[in-house]
Image: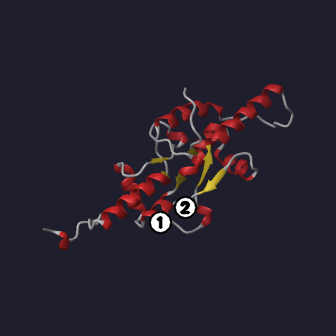
């Protein structure tokens, strides 16, 4: 298996890579064991509902430290991680999805704000290939790739925005077809 770059992970993906329950991931991030960043998901204004992304490199490093401590019989480890079996299938699944780096990642709301469009249109652009984005992988459905929210590449959003601004500068309005544009 090839080495993955520092990808942005959803909570479920990070939990699978770490071999822990998904509720532990935020606690580990709050304790400073792994890096995380809150992104704007797009719907709802509550900060409690905003998703977070996690660093794959930090998750890999934390798991390696855990294995080393387990090997040495360190008494600071109270109990073993119970979901280690989810780790390998998740790492294989992450190799098949678009590689969006942790520092380059943003959410649907961030993409919509930057492009000045509705969040639903961002998802359509992503599904159509106009933006580099991916759905988070749900650990219960690793094969299907289902998830509740998307991770976008900020650089692809900036490229799309620059292309739209260039088209508008040339007088070619992008977007919906208007009745007065017919010739």
As helix, strand or loop, the secondary structure at mark 1 comes to helix
* Earlier-in-chain disc, 1 versus 2: 2
Q: Is residue 19 left or right of residue 161?
A: right
Farthest residue to the bottom: give it: 180
Farthest residue to the right: give it: 75
Farthest residue to the left: give it: 183
- Whether residue 2 is situated above or below residue 40 in the rendered picture: above
- Whether residue 112 is situated above or below residue 105 in the rendered picture: below
As helix, strand or loop, the secondary structure at mark 2 comes to loop
Q: How many residues crowd around disc 1 within 10 Å: few (fewer than 14), some, or many (20 or more)?
A: some
Residue 108: image location, x then y, percent = 48, 58
Q: Nearer the viewer, residue 74 or 56?
A: 56
Residue shown at the point (43%, 62%) measured from the top left: 119
Residue shown at the point (64%, 40%) measured from the top left: 57
Q: Which image quadrant: the C terminus?
A: bottom left
- Can see residue 158? yes
Structure colour scheme: secondary structure
**Contact (Cβ within 8 Å) of mark 1 with mark 2:** yes
Q: Nearer the viewer, residue 129 or 22?
A: 129
* Disc 2: which residue: 40
Residue 129: image location, x then y, percent = 36, 48
- Can see residue 149? no
Residue 116 figure quarter: bottom left
Labelled disc at residue 8: none
Q: Which image quadrant: the N terminus?
A: top right
* Disc 1: which residue: 113
Residue shown at the point (55%, 69%) measured from the top left: 45
CA–CA distance in space, label 1 to label 2: 10 Å
What is the number of callouts on the image?
2
Q: Nearer the viewer, residue 12 or 132?
A: 132
Q: Nearer the viewer, mark 1 or mark 2?
A: 1
Residue shown at the point (37%, 50%) measured from the top left: 127
């Amino acid at each position: 298996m090839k080495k993955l770059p520092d990808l942005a992970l959803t909570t479920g993906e990070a939990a699978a890579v770490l071999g822990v329950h998904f509720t532990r991931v935020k606690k580990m991030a709050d304790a400073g064991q792994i890096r995380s960043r809150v992104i704007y998901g797009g719907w709802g204004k509550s900060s409690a509902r905003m998703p977070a992304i996690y660093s794959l490199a930090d998750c890999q490093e934390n798991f390696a430290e855990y294995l080393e401590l387990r090997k040495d019989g360190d008494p600071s480890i109270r109990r073993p991680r119970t979901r280690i079996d989810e780790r390998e299938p998740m790492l294989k699944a992450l190799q098949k999805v678009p590689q969006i780096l942790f520092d380059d990642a943003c959410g649907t709301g961030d993409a919509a704000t930057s492009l000045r469009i509705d969040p639903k249109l961002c998802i359509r652009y992503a599904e159509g290939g106009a933006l580099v984005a991916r759905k988070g992988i749900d650990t219960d459905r690793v094969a299907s790739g289902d998830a509740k929210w998307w991770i976008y590449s900020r650089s692809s959003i900036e490229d799309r925005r620059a292309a739209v601004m260039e088209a508008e500068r040339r007088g070619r309005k992008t977007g919906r077809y208007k009745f007065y544009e017919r010739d």
